[in-house]
Amino acid sequence: MSDQLAVLVEDLTKRYGRLVAVNQLSLDVTRGEIFGVLGPNGAGKTTLIEVLEGLRMPDSGAVRVLGFDPRRELDMIKERIGVQLQSSSFFRKLRVVEVLKQFRSYYRKRADIDDLLEMVALNEKRNSFITDLSGGQRQRLALALALVNEPDIIFLDEPTAGLDAQVRRQLWHTIEQMKSAGKTVLLTTHYIEEAERLCDRVLILDGGQRIALDSPANLIAHARGRSARLRFATARPFSPEPEATFKVIESSKNGSYTYTAQVGDTGRSIVELVSAIEHQKNELVELQISRATLEDVFVELTGKEIRE
Amino acid sequence: MNIVWQETTIHTKIYFRERQAVFWGFVFPLLLLFLFCSIFGGTPERSSSLVAGLICINVMAGALFGTGVITVGAREQGILRRYKMAPVSPWKIVTGMVVSRYVSITLATLLMLVLARLVYHITLPSNIPAALLVYSTGAVMFSALAFVVASLARSLAEANGVSQALFMPMMFLSGATFPFEFMPAWLQKIAHVMPSTYYVSALKTVMAAGGGIKECSLDLTVMAVVTLLAVMVSARFFKWE
Ligand SMILES: Nc1ncnc2c1ncn2[C@@H]1O[C@H](COP(=O)(O)OP(=O)(O)OP(=O)(O)O)[C@@H](O)[C@H]1O
Ligand SMILES: [Mg+2]
């Protein structure tokens, strides 16, 4: 196996009793990339990431992290990975800086505490007790804990869940900094914007199955008939020609007649739309074009909305 | 070793920062001391024997509730799971927790001995090494038993219930509170399967003038065997999540 691979998963299956949480999944994560796992609740994201961390035993398939097998060589892996669990709790009556120092002491390689606090913007809270932290601050502490050993790979299970928009952007920045520092990041998320904005590649997971795996741009480009969304309004009711290259998916009437359409080839569809309106002696009142998002891709591929 | 020391200090800090823990570990035993000695005391010898019982009660409560139940709570909250991610031997962390609890219980015990000496003129152990050995053997035994509870209990509520169910009879039947001799024969039989009975007996021996290791070698042997079994069971069944 190549040195370029941070993570390799082949045909991984993990069951809980009769429930198949991860089903014959294969993927690889290249060193230095930000790899996202996107999926709805119960998709198997946590299960996948915890198998990589050695917290859960796979039923079948091969897993390598930095070339090591979590089943047998976990100690080698532990020194070189950083982990943020989906939910972390700490002893109540410890101070932020004490927790960081405690966990740092378990590793051979040790990060600078001040740098860590700076990175997750917890400088002012360094001497606060865990009990006195907000949920978001605890989340950031958990992220800092994942960095105490200057890891090569960082596993983040929903790192920005429940954070407000500003803190989330700040964390994105931190994660991008890690990437610039040459680290590999594997994160799970519910947030499409997060995957789109942050990740080099995204795995879409649903029901434990791999639905798609590609860069956000490619996923969007390849989703058939989904490359853009048109919103337009006409003065009178409009009905598309049967052979139109776009598909009207929503219509409503408030003053004018408003439609939303999915289009594949944007340019051609607009020409077609305008001539159809003209042909029907109708009048175009308004036209908006927006690029398809990962969300559209997700809905198309899984037939579901991602949000809870 | 560094890690064990670090965990010991960390858990000692956590302990002394929790007001509740300090109340049950330090204030409550002293309240019991004054209560017991003023009701049942009378002579320094009687008080001395009551103090032996109180030391046992304090060690049992500290281990069962302070170590065992707290550990299950930490597991239930997912605190312990985080340690599994790090390249650290879990047993170093457990040892740190046990040692820190030993330190706090010992401080409480010393405080109680000093007060009992000043107020009730109890005799202090003359054979200090023997007293320390007996005291520590019991402390280690109850820590190990607490981990058995923590290993077998599936929830915090279960750990609490089991600990209560062990604590109550051991408190009343092992000679820690009521003199053993006043109990009916069948109760005495029950008492003899409780590890606390041997602890109280050994503590009483070393607290009385002249008592040494030889006089309580049977008690010490029983406690050592119980400890060994308890360590084996918890090593086999203890879970971090
Ligand atoms: N320890 C477990 N025992 C039994 N079933 C489990 C266990 N952990 C997870 N599952 C089940 O496996 C499936 C996948 O769960 P997982 O936690 O991996 O999903 P997820 O994608 O992380 O979801 P979320 O977005 O809610 O965190 C779910 O149906 C869940 O109920
Ligand atoms: Mg999850």
Image (cartoon, coloured by chain):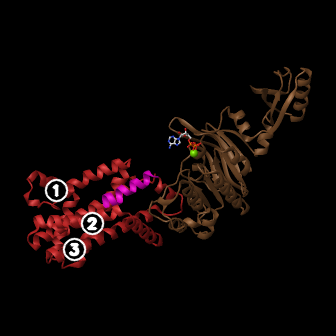
Badge 1 density bin: few <14, some 14–19, many ≥20, Cα 10 Å = many
The residue wearing badge 2 is: B27
Dominant secondary-structure state across the stretch colored magenta: helix
Q: Residue at x 48, y 63 (%)?
A: A129
Closer-to-camera residue (B74/A108): B74
Badge 3 density bin: few <14, some 14–19, many ≥20, Cα 10 Å = many
Determine the colour of chain B. Answer: red
Determine the colour of chain A. Answer: brown
Whole-angstrom CA distance, mark 2 to mark 3, is: 14 Å
Q: Is mark 2 within 8 Å of ligand 1?
A: no
Q: Residue at x 54, y 58 (%)?
A: B85
Image depth: mark 2 or mark 1 in front: 2
- Marks 3,1: beta carbons within 8 A: no
* Residue B71 part of the magenta-drawn span: yes
The residue wearing badge 3 is: B113
Q: Chain of mark 1?
A: B
* Residue A147 part of the magenta-drawn span: no
Where residue B240 appears, x then y in whole percent?
45, 54
The residue wearing badge 1 is: B173
Instruction: Evaluate whether residue A112 shows in this view.
Output: no
Q: Which residues are magenta?
A: B63-77
Label 1 element class: helix
Marked residue nearer the N-terminal end (3 or 1) = 3
